Amino acid sequence: MDWQNLLDRRRLCDANYVEKTDRPTFIQDADRITFSAPFRRLANKTQVHPLYENDHLHHRLIHSVETASVGRSLGIAVGDWLEKEHGLGAGEKYVVAGMTQAACLAHDIGNPPFGHSGEAAIGSWFAESFRGPSELFGAIETPLRLEFQDFEGNAQGFRIISRLEMYRNEGGMRLSMGVLGAFAKYPVTARVRAKAKQPYRGLKKFGVFESDAELFAQVAEAVGLPVETLGADRWWRRHPLVFLVEAADDICYNILDLEDAYASGDFNEDIVLKHLQSLAGIPNVDLADRTTDEIIAYARARAIGSAIDACVAAFKANYDAIMSGSFSGSLIEASARSREFAAIENLSRQRLFTSPRKTELEVFGRNVLHRVLDGLIGVFEQLRARNWDPAGLDGYHEQLRRAANLDLRDVKDEYTALHALTDYVSGMTDRYAVKIAKLVAGV
Protein backbone atom coordinates (compact mmCIF):
# COMPACT_ATOMS: atom_id res chain seq x y z
CA MET A 1 0.00 0.00 0.00
CA ASP A 2 1.18 3.54 -0.61
CA TRP A 3 0.12 6.77 1.06
CA GLN A 4 -0.73 8.63 -2.13
CA ASN A 5 -3.61 6.21 -2.65
CA LEU A 6 -4.40 5.65 1.02
CA LEU A 7 -5.05 9.38 1.51
CA ASP A 8 -7.28 9.64 -1.58
CA ARG A 9 -9.39 12.81 -1.29
CA ARG A 10 -11.83 11.91 -4.06
CA ARG A 11 -15.41 11.54 -2.88
CA LEU A 12 -17.58 8.45 -3.21
CA CYS A 13 -20.12 8.90 -6.05
CA ASP A 14 -19.02 12.48 -6.77
CA ALA A 15 -16.80 12.49 -9.86
CA ASN A 16 -17.03 16.28 -10.23
CA TYR A 17 -15.73 17.12 -6.76
CA VAL A 18 -12.80 19.52 -6.59
CA GLU A 19 -11.04 20.02 -3.25
CA LYS A 20 -10.97 23.57 -1.88
CA THR A 21 -7.60 24.88 -0.75
CA ASP A 22 -9.17 26.82 2.12
CA ARG A 23 -11.33 23.93 3.36
CA PRO A 24 -9.68 20.55 2.81
CA THR A 25 -11.74 17.45 2.15
CA PHE A 26 -11.00 15.84 5.51
CA ILE A 27 -12.30 18.93 7.33
CA GLN A 28 -15.50 18.82 5.29
CA ASP A 29 -15.78 15.11 6.06
CA ALA A 30 -15.59 15.76 9.80
CA ASP A 31 -18.17 18.52 9.45
CA ARG A 32 -20.59 16.33 7.49
CA ILE A 33 -20.39 13.66 10.16
CA THR A 34 -20.67 16.12 13.05
CA PHE A 35 -23.79 17.84 11.71
CA SER A 36 -25.59 14.65 10.67
CA ALA A 37 -28.70 13.41 12.47
CA PRO A 38 -27.29 9.91 13.18
CA PHE A 39 -24.26 11.49 14.88
CA ARG A 40 -26.46 13.79 16.97
CA ARG A 41 -28.57 10.84 18.12
CA LEU A 42 -25.47 9.29 19.70
CA ALA A 43 -26.05 11.75 22.56
CA ASN A 44 -28.80 9.45 23.80
CA LYS A 45 -27.24 6.08 23.08
CA THR A 46 -25.57 3.88 25.67
CA GLN A 47 -21.80 3.72 26.00
CA VAL A 48 -21.63 1.40 29.03
CA HIS A 49 -24.45 2.46 31.35
CA PRO A 50 -27.95 2.22 29.78
CA LEU A 51 -30.48 4.95 30.60
CA TYR A 52 -27.99 6.56 32.96
CA GLU A 53 -29.11 9.04 35.63
CA ASN A 54 -25.67 10.60 36.24
CA ASP A 55 -25.03 13.30 33.64
CA HIS A 56 -21.26 12.88 34.07
CA LEU A 57 -21.30 9.39 32.53
CA HIS A 58 -20.32 8.92 28.91
CA HIS A 59 -22.79 8.42 26.10
CA ARG A 60 -21.85 7.48 22.54
CA LEU A 61 -21.60 11.06 21.33
CA ILE A 62 -19.05 12.32 23.85
CA HIS A 63 -17.15 9.03 23.50
CA SER A 64 -16.97 9.62 19.74
CA VAL A 65 -15.74 13.19 20.23
CA GLU A 66 -13.07 12.03 22.69
CA THR A 67 -12.04 9.19 20.39
CA ALA A 68 -11.67 11.67 17.54
CA SER A 69 -9.45 13.85 19.71
CA VAL A 70 -7.17 10.93 20.56
CA GLY A 71 -7.25 9.77 16.94
CA ARG A 72 -6.11 13.18 15.77
CA SER A 73 -3.18 13.05 18.21
CA LEU A 74 -2.23 9.58 17.00
CA GLY A 75 -2.54 10.71 13.40
CA ILE A 76 -0.41 13.83 13.73
CA ALA A 77 2.34 11.89 15.52
CA VAL A 78 2.37 9.08 12.96
CA GLY A 79 2.06 11.55 10.09
CA ASP A 80 5.01 13.57 11.36
CA TRP A 81 7.10 10.40 11.50
CA LEU A 82 6.00 9.42 7.99
CA GLU A 83 7.08 12.81 6.66
CA LYS A 84 10.50 12.48 8.29
CA GLU A 85 11.17 8.80 7.67
CA HIS A 86 9.01 7.52 4.81
CA GLY A 87 8.74 10.29 2.26
CA LEU A 88 5.22 11.49 3.01
CA GLY A 89 4.74 14.89 1.40
CA ALA A 90 5.24 18.06 3.40
CA GLY A 91 2.10 18.96 5.30
CA GLU A 92 0.48 15.57 4.64
CA LYS A 93 0.69 14.78 8.35
CA TYR A 94 -2.35 17.02 8.74
CA VAL A 95 -4.22 14.88 6.22
CA VAL A 96 -3.31 11.74 8.18
CA ALA A 97 -4.52 13.40 11.38
CA GLY A 98 -7.67 14.82 9.79
CA MET A 99 -8.73 11.58 8.13
CA THR A 100 -8.13 9.64 11.33
CA GLN A 101 -10.16 12.19 13.27
CA ALA A 102 -13.07 12.04 10.81
CA ALA A 103 -13.14 8.23 10.81
CA CYS A 104 -13.07 8.27 14.62
CA LEU A 105 -16.03 10.64 14.73
CA ALA A 106 -18.06 8.16 12.68
CA HIS A 107 -16.81 4.94 14.25
CA ASP A 108 -19.93 4.35 16.42
CA ILE A 109 -22.51 5.99 14.15
CA GLY A 110 -24.16 2.66 13.33
CA ASN A 111 -24.49 1.41 16.90
CA PRO A 112 -28.05 0.63 18.05
CA PRO A 113 -29.66 1.71 21.32
CA PHE A 114 -28.47 0.04 24.54
CA GLY A 115 -24.90 -0.47 23.32
CA HIS A 116 -23.50 -3.90 22.49
CA SER A 117 -26.39 -5.53 24.31
CA GLY A 118 -28.61 -3.81 21.73
CA GLU A 119 -26.70 -5.52 18.92
CA ALA A 120 -27.19 -8.84 20.67
CA ALA A 121 -30.90 -8.14 21.19
CA ILE A 122 -31.48 -7.36 17.51
CA GLY A 123 -29.52 -10.45 16.50
CA SER A 124 -31.38 -12.77 18.87
CA TRP A 125 -34.76 -11.50 17.63
CA PHE A 126 -33.82 -12.22 14.03
CA ALA A 127 -32.38 -15.63 14.89
CA GLU A 128 -35.70 -16.57 16.49
CA SER A 129 -37.65 -15.14 13.56
CA PHE A 130 -35.65 -17.08 10.96
CA ARG A 131 -36.59 -20.28 12.78
CA GLY A 132 -40.29 -19.41 12.55
CA PRO A 133 -42.86 -20.01 9.80
CA SER A 134 -42.96 -16.47 8.36
CA GLU A 135 -42.53 -16.34 4.58
CA LEU A 136 -40.95 -12.90 4.91
CA PHE A 137 -38.03 -14.42 6.81
CA GLY A 138 -38.04 -17.71 4.92
CA ALA A 139 -37.35 -15.89 1.65
CA ILE A 140 -33.93 -14.69 2.85
CA GLU A 141 -31.08 -16.89 1.66
CA THR A 142 -29.19 -18.57 4.49
CA PRO A 143 -25.85 -16.73 3.92
CA LEU A 144 -27.62 -13.35 4.03
CA ARG A 145 -29.33 -14.18 7.32
CA LEU A 146 -25.99 -13.64 9.06
CA GLU A 147 -26.33 -9.89 8.45
CA PHE A 148 -29.37 -9.83 10.70
CA GLN A 149 -28.91 -12.59 13.28
CA ASP A 150 -25.33 -11.41 13.88
CA PHE A 151 -26.27 -7.74 13.56
CA GLU A 152 -23.17 -5.56 13.45
CA GLY A 153 -23.03 -1.83 14.15
CA ASN A 154 -19.87 -1.44 12.08
CA ALA A 155 -21.66 -2.58 8.93
CA GLN A 156 -24.65 -0.40 9.78
CA GLY A 157 -22.26 2.52 10.18
CA PHE A 158 -20.79 2.03 6.71
CA ARG A 159 -24.34 1.80 5.34
CA ILE A 160 -25.25 5.12 6.99
CA ILE A 161 -22.23 7.09 5.79
CA SER A 162 -22.08 5.57 2.30
CA ARG A 163 -25.76 5.17 1.45
CA LEU A 164 -28.46 6.47 3.78
CA GLU A 165 -27.44 9.91 5.04
CA MET A 166 -27.49 13.07 2.86
CA TYR A 167 -27.28 11.76 -0.73
CA ARG A 168 -29.50 8.72 -0.25
CA ASN A 169 -28.45 5.81 -2.46
CA GLU A 170 -25.95 8.09 -4.20
CA GLY A 171 -22.94 7.84 -1.92
CA GLY A 172 -24.55 8.88 1.36
CA MET A 173 -22.41 11.56 2.98
CA ARG A 174 -20.00 11.26 0.03
CA LEU A 175 -17.00 11.20 2.30
CA SER A 176 -13.50 10.96 0.88
CA MET A 177 -12.21 7.54 -0.11
CA GLY A 178 -9.42 7.82 2.46
CA VAL A 179 -11.83 8.43 5.35
CA LEU A 180 -14.15 5.62 4.24
CA GLY A 181 -11.18 3.27 4.07
CA ALA A 182 -10.01 4.35 7.53
CA PHE A 183 -13.53 3.76 8.89
CA ALA A 184 -13.77 0.13 7.76
CA LYS A 185 -12.42 -1.98 10.63
CA TYR A 186 -13.81 -5.16 9.07
CA PRO A 187 -13.60 -4.94 5.26
CA VAL A 188 -15.64 -8.06 4.53
CA THR A 189 -19.29 -9.07 4.19
CA ALA A 190 -20.91 -11.56 6.56
CA ARG A 191 -21.33 -14.11 3.79
CA VAL A 192 -17.67 -14.00 2.71
CA ARG A 193 -16.42 -13.85 6.30
CA ALA A 194 -18.15 -17.16 6.99
CA LYS A 195 -16.04 -18.71 4.21
CA ALA A 196 -12.73 -16.93 4.97
CA LYS A 197 -11.42 -18.96 7.87
CA GLN A 198 -8.26 -17.01 8.67
CA PRO A 199 -7.03 -15.60 12.00
CA TYR A 200 -6.87 -12.07 10.58
CA ARG A 201 -8.09 -9.23 12.80
CA GLY A 202 -10.07 -7.66 9.96
CA LEU A 203 -12.14 -10.86 9.80
CA LYS A 204 -13.05 -10.87 13.50
CA LYS A 205 -16.45 -9.45 12.54
CA PHE A 206 -18.06 -8.27 9.31
CA GLY A 207 -18.24 -4.59 8.42
CA VAL A 208 -20.09 -4.41 5.10
CA PHE A 209 -23.58 -5.54 4.15
CA GLU A 210 -24.02 -7.41 0.87
CA SER A 211 -26.10 -4.52 -0.47
CA ASP A 212 -23.17 -2.14 0.10
CA ALA A 213 -20.38 -4.44 -1.09
CA GLU A 214 -19.94 -2.73 -4.45
CA LEU A 215 -19.72 0.66 -2.78
CA PHE A 216 -16.98 -0.62 -0.53
CA ALA A 217 -15.22 -2.22 -3.50
CA GLN A 218 -14.97 1.26 -5.05
CA VAL A 219 -13.39 2.54 -1.85
CA ALA A 220 -10.98 -0.39 -1.56
CA GLU A 221 -9.84 -0.03 -5.17
CA ALA A 222 -9.38 3.73 -4.84
CA VAL A 223 -7.18 3.54 -1.74
CA GLY A 224 -5.37 0.41 -2.85
CA LEU A 225 -6.29 -2.12 -0.18
CA PRO A 226 -4.79 -5.58 -0.82
CA VAL A 227 -7.56 -7.91 -1.98
CA GLU A 228 -7.97 -11.58 -1.10
CA THR A 229 -10.11 -13.81 -3.32
CA LEU A 230 -12.20 -16.86 -2.48
CA GLY A 231 -13.39 -18.11 -5.83
CA ALA A 232 -15.70 -15.38 -7.10
CA ASP A 233 -15.77 -13.71 -3.68
CA ARG A 234 -13.31 -11.26 -2.15
CA TRP A 235 -12.34 -9.44 1.01
CA TRP A 236 -9.70 -6.85 1.76
CA ARG A 237 -6.84 -6.15 4.14
CA ARG A 238 -7.19 -3.20 6.48
CA HIS A 239 -6.32 0.41 5.68
CA PRO A 240 -3.35 1.41 7.91
CA LEU A 241 -5.31 4.24 9.53
CA VAL A 242 -7.85 1.69 10.79
CA PHE A 243 -5.27 0.69 13.38
CA LEU A 244 -5.10 4.28 14.64
CA VAL A 245 -8.90 4.56 14.76
CA GLU A 246 -9.12 1.27 16.63
CA ALA A 247 -6.39 2.33 19.07
CA ALA A 248 -8.12 5.65 19.77
CA ASP A 249 -11.35 3.78 20.53
CA ASP A 250 -9.56 1.26 22.76
CA ILE A 251 -7.73 4.00 24.65
CA CYS A 252 -10.88 6.00 25.29
CA TYR A 253 -13.28 3.30 26.32
CA ASN A 254 -10.82 1.46 28.56
CA ILE A 255 -9.60 4.57 30.37
CA LEU A 256 -12.85 6.53 30.47
CA ASP A 257 -14.82 3.47 31.58
CA LEU A 258 -12.70 3.54 34.74
CA GLU A 259 -13.55 7.18 35.36
CA ASP A 260 -17.23 6.48 34.73
CA ALA A 261 -17.11 3.51 37.09
CA TYR A 262 -15.88 5.84 39.83
CA ALA A 263 -18.61 8.39 39.06
CA SER A 264 -21.30 5.70 39.10
CA GLY A 265 -20.03 4.20 42.35
CA ASP A 266 -19.09 0.84 40.82
CA PHE A 267 -15.37 1.31 41.62
CA ASN A 268 -13.75 3.17 44.49
CA GLU A 269 -11.00 5.74 43.98
CA ASP A 270 -8.19 3.39 45.04
CA ILE A 271 -8.95 0.85 42.32
CA VAL A 272 -9.31 3.51 39.63
CA LEU A 273 -6.14 5.37 40.60
CA LYS A 274 -4.16 2.14 40.81
CA HIS A 275 -4.91 1.26 37.19
CA LEU A 276 -4.59 4.80 35.84
CA GLN A 277 -1.24 5.33 37.55
CA SER A 278 0.03 1.99 36.29
CA LEU A 279 -0.95 2.86 32.74
CA ALA A 280 0.49 6.36 33.03
CA GLY A 281 3.75 5.01 34.42
CA ILE A 282 3.61 7.20 37.52
CA PRO A 283 3.96 5.59 40.98
CA ASN A 284 1.63 8.01 42.76
CA VAL A 285 -0.23 11.26 42.32
CA ASP A 286 0.70 13.81 44.98
CA LEU A 287 -1.83 16.58 44.59
CA ALA A 288 -2.72 17.36 48.18
CA ASP A 289 -4.73 20.47 47.38
CA ARG A 290 -6.96 18.72 44.81
CA THR A 291 -10.24 16.90 45.16
CA THR A 292 -10.49 13.21 44.39
CA ASP A 293 -12.27 14.00 41.12
CA GLU A 294 -9.41 16.30 40.11
CA ILE A 295 -6.76 13.74 41.02
CA ILE A 296 -8.52 11.07 38.95
CA ALA A 297 -8.87 13.50 36.03
CA TYR A 298 -5.14 14.26 36.19
CA ALA A 299 -4.22 10.57 36.28
CA ARG A 300 -6.60 9.90 33.40
CA ALA A 301 -4.96 12.61 31.28
CA ARG A 302 -1.50 11.19 32.00
CA ALA A 303 -2.73 7.68 31.17
CA ILE A 304 -4.14 8.79 27.82
CA GLY A 305 -0.88 10.52 26.96
CA SER A 306 1.12 7.43 27.85
CA ALA A 307 -1.19 5.21 25.81
CA ILE A 308 -0.91 7.49 22.76
CA ASP A 309 2.88 7.36 22.93
CA ALA A 310 2.84 3.57 23.27
CA CYS A 311 0.51 3.10 20.29
CA VAL A 312 2.55 5.43 18.08
CA ALA A 313 5.65 3.41 18.96
CA ALA A 314 3.77 0.18 18.14
CA PHE A 315 2.72 1.57 14.75
CA LYS A 316 6.35 2.42 13.95
CA ALA A 317 7.61 -0.98 15.11
CA ASN A 318 5.06 -2.84 12.97
CA TYR A 319 5.05 -0.44 10.03
CA ASP A 320 6.17 -2.88 7.34
CA ALA A 321 3.57 -5.47 8.33
CA ILE A 322 0.85 -2.82 8.54
CA MET A 323 1.67 -1.52 5.06
CA SER A 324 1.76 -4.99 3.52
CA GLY A 325 -1.57 -5.90 5.11
CA SER A 326 -0.12 -8.77 7.13
CA PHE A 327 -0.31 -7.18 10.59
CA SER A 328 -3.10 -8.95 12.44
CA GLY A 329 -2.93 -7.58 15.96
CA SER A 330 -4.00 -4.31 17.51
CA LEU A 331 -1.68 -1.47 18.41
CA ILE A 332 -2.74 -1.81 22.04
CA GLU A 333 -1.78 -5.49 22.08
CA ALA A 334 1.51 -4.74 20.33
CA SER A 335 2.36 -1.82 22.62
CA ALA A 336 4.50 -1.54 25.73
CA ARG A 337 1.27 -0.90 27.70
CA SER A 338 -0.52 -4.09 26.66
CA ARG A 339 -0.37 -5.63 30.15
CA GLU A 340 -1.87 -2.55 31.77
CA PHE A 341 -4.71 -2.48 29.26
CA ALA A 342 -5.32 -6.20 29.73
CA ALA A 343 -5.63 -5.64 33.48
CA ILE A 344 -8.21 -2.87 32.94
CA GLU A 345 -10.20 -5.01 30.50
CA ASN A 346 -10.19 -7.92 32.93
CA LEU A 347 -11.37 -5.69 35.78
CA SER A 348 -14.17 -4.22 33.67
CA ARG A 349 -15.27 -7.62 32.42
CA GLN A 350 -15.41 -9.13 35.91
CA ARG A 351 -16.90 -6.26 37.87
CA LEU A 352 -18.24 -3.43 35.71
CA PHE A 353 -20.00 -5.22 32.86
CA THR A 354 -21.74 -7.56 35.30
CA SER A 355 -22.88 -4.98 37.86
CA PRO A 356 -26.49 -5.53 39.00
CA ARG A 357 -27.86 -2.22 37.69
CA LYS A 358 -26.20 -2.63 34.30
CA THR A 359 -27.43 -6.21 34.01
CA GLU A 360 -31.00 -5.22 34.91
CA LEU A 361 -31.03 -2.41 32.36
CA GLU A 362 -29.60 -4.65 29.64
CA VAL A 363 -32.41 -7.13 30.25
CA PHE A 364 -34.84 -4.21 30.07
CA GLY A 365 -33.23 -2.97 26.85
CA ARG A 366 -33.48 -6.39 25.22
CA ASN A 367 -37.17 -6.61 26.03
CA VAL A 368 -37.71 -3.07 24.71
CA LEU A 369 -36.09 -3.85 21.36
CA HIS A 370 -37.87 -7.19 21.00
CA ARG A 371 -41.17 -5.46 21.72
CA VAL A 372 -40.42 -2.81 19.09
CA LEU A 373 -39.49 -5.42 16.48
CA ASP A 374 -42.53 -7.55 17.33
CA GLY A 375 -44.76 -4.51 17.00
CA LEU A 376 -43.41 -3.27 13.67
CA ILE A 377 -42.84 -6.47 11.72
CA GLY A 378 -46.53 -6.62 10.82
CA VAL A 379 -46.10 -3.57 8.58
CA PHE A 380 -43.49 -5.40 6.52
CA GLU A 381 -45.47 -8.65 6.48
CA GLN A 382 -48.43 -6.78 5.04
CA LEU A 383 -46.23 -4.91 2.56
CA ARG A 384 -45.09 -8.27 1.21
CA ALA A 385 -48.68 -9.42 0.89
CA ARG A 386 -49.49 -6.19 -1.01
CA ASN A 387 -46.63 -6.67 -3.50
CA TRP A 388 -44.49 -4.06 -1.69
CA ASP A 389 -46.91 -1.21 -2.36
CA PRO A 390 -47.15 1.10 0.71
CA ALA A 391 -50.49 2.36 -0.58
CA GLY A 392 -51.86 -1.11 0.11
CA LEU A 393 -51.36 -0.94 3.87
CA ASP A 394 -54.62 -1.22 5.79
CA GLY A 395 -55.82 1.43 8.24
CA TYR A 396 -53.98 0.19 11.33
CA HIS A 397 -50.67 -0.56 9.65
CA GLU A 398 -50.71 2.78 7.83
CA GLN A 399 -51.40 4.50 11.15
CA LEU A 400 -48.54 2.56 12.73
CA ARG A 401 -46.23 3.52 9.87
CA ARG A 402 -47.07 7.19 10.37
CA ALA A 403 -46.96 7.05 14.18
CA ALA A 404 -43.55 5.38 14.16
CA ASN A 405 -42.34 7.41 11.16
CA LEU A 406 -41.20 4.31 9.28
CA ASP A 407 -39.26 4.97 6.06
CA LEU A 408 -40.38 2.51 3.38
CA ARG A 409 -38.92 4.25 0.32
CA ASP A 410 -36.39 1.55 -0.55
CA VAL A 411 -38.47 -1.50 0.33
CA LYS A 412 -38.96 -3.67 -2.75
CA ASP A 413 -38.31 -7.23 -1.54
CA GLU A 414 -37.72 -9.24 1.62
CA TYR A 415 -34.04 -8.32 1.93
CA THR A 416 -34.62 -4.58 1.63
CA ALA A 417 -37.60 -4.88 3.99
CA LEU A 418 -35.47 -6.35 6.77
CA HIS A 419 -32.79 -3.74 6.22
CA ALA A 420 -35.40 -0.99 6.44
CA LEU A 421 -36.48 -2.49 9.76
CA THR A 422 -32.92 -2.64 11.12
CA ASP A 423 -32.22 0.87 9.79
CA TYR A 424 -35.12 2.10 11.89
CA VAL A 425 -34.46 0.14 15.07
CA SER A 426 -30.69 0.64 15.13
CA GLY A 427 -31.17 4.37 14.54
CA MET A 428 -33.32 4.86 17.63
CA THR A 429 -31.98 6.43 20.80
CA ASP A 430 -32.42 4.59 24.09
CA ARG A 431 -35.33 6.78 25.18
CA TYR A 432 -37.04 6.76 21.78
CA ALA A 433 -36.87 2.96 21.77
CA VAL A 434 -38.70 2.93 25.10
CA LYS A 435 -41.30 5.33 23.67
CA ILE A 436 -41.95 3.19 20.59
CA ALA A 437 -42.07 0.02 22.68
CA LYS A 438 -44.86 1.60 24.73
CA LEU A 439 -46.62 2.71 21.55
CA VAL A 440 -46.73 -0.72 19.93
CA ALA A 441 -47.60 -2.44 23.23
CA GLY A 442 -50.38 0.01 24.05
CA VAL A 443 -49.03 0.90 27.50
Image (spheres, rainbow, N blue to C red):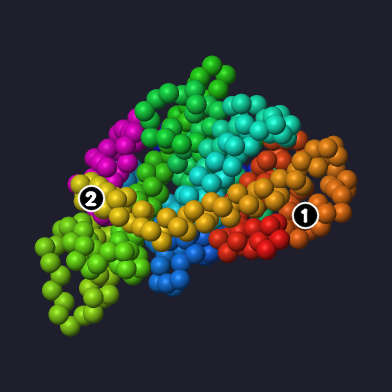
Q: Which residue is mark 2?
A: 343
- Res 28 visible: no
Q: Amino acid at mark 1?
A: Arg
Up/down of 372 relative to 139, above or below: below
1 and 2 marks in contact (CB < 8 Å) = no
* Relative vertical location of residue 348 with respect to residue 151 in this rendering, above or below: below
Tell me if 409 is positioned left or right of 434 in this view. Answer: right
The answer to which of 305 and 351 lies nearer the viewer is: 351
Q: Position of residue 282 (x, y in %)?
A: 14, 62
Q: Main secondary structure of the magenta part?
A: helix
Residue placed at 68% from the left, 57% from the top? 441
Q: Position of residue 383 (x, y in %)?
A: 81, 42
Residue name at image x 43 percent, y 52 percent: 100
Q: Where does residue 289 sit, x and y in percent of width and height? A: 17, 83
Q: Point out the residue furthest to the bottom here.
A: 289
Q: Secondary structure at mark 1?
A: helix
Check disc 2 and give the amino acid type.
Answer: Ala
* Quadrant in which the C terminus is drawn: bottom right
Measuring from the top left, give residue 167's x and y in whole percent.
69, 51
